[in-house]
Amino acid sequence: FGIYLITDSNTGKQYVGSAYGAEGILGRWKEYVQSGHGYNQQLIGLLAPDRNYCQNFRFTILRTLSKSLTKSEVMDVESLYKEKLGSRVFGLNSN
């Protein structure tokens, strides 16, 4: 489990996400590779005019977490990072 950051290298805007599925961060990132946007609305909007825009995304692990945490606990940590980095107000997080 963990918290990750996607940075749009074109604009500098950031997206904070979390992974709490069976495959952890790797599994979540596989979804980005397959879809280009990981089913996030703002990222989908960036790819609408240019499917290759995802080449601008840079992925970073912010924090690994114990697999013993609940989904709610992981999302609480994710929310903390969204606040710290301002990704709701100035970045790519809608929630």
Image (tube, helix red, strand yellow):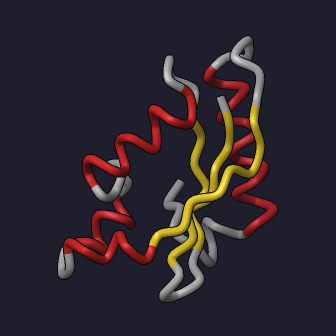
Q: How many marks?
A: 0
- Residue sitting at x 34%, y 57%: 37
* Residue 84 location (% of width, % of height): 81, 62
Q: In the figure, 5 relative to 76: above or below? A: below
Q: Nearer the viewer, residue 67 or 87?
A: 67
* Residue 17 location (% of width, % of height): 57, 48
On the rendered structure, is 52 left or right of 26? Answer: left
On the rendered structure, is 50 left or right of 68? Answer: left
| Position of the N terminus by quadrant | top right
Q: In the figure, 94 relative to 68: above or below? A: below
Residue 48, quarter of the rendered image: bottom left
* Residue 70 location (% of width, % of height): 67, 16
- Residue sitting at x 20%, y 79%: 50
On the rendered structure, is 69 left or right of 42? Answer: right
- Residue sitting at x 75%, y 67%: 85
Query: Going by the picture, which residue comes out furthest to the bottom?
Result: 11
On the rendered structure, is 59 left or right of 2? Answer: left
Residue 51, quarter of the rendered image: bottom left
Query: Going by the picture, which residue comes out furthest to the top?
Result: 68
* Residue 4 location (% of width, % of height): 64, 50
- Residue sitting at x 31%, y 77%: 53
Q: In the figure, 34 relative to 28: above or below? A: below
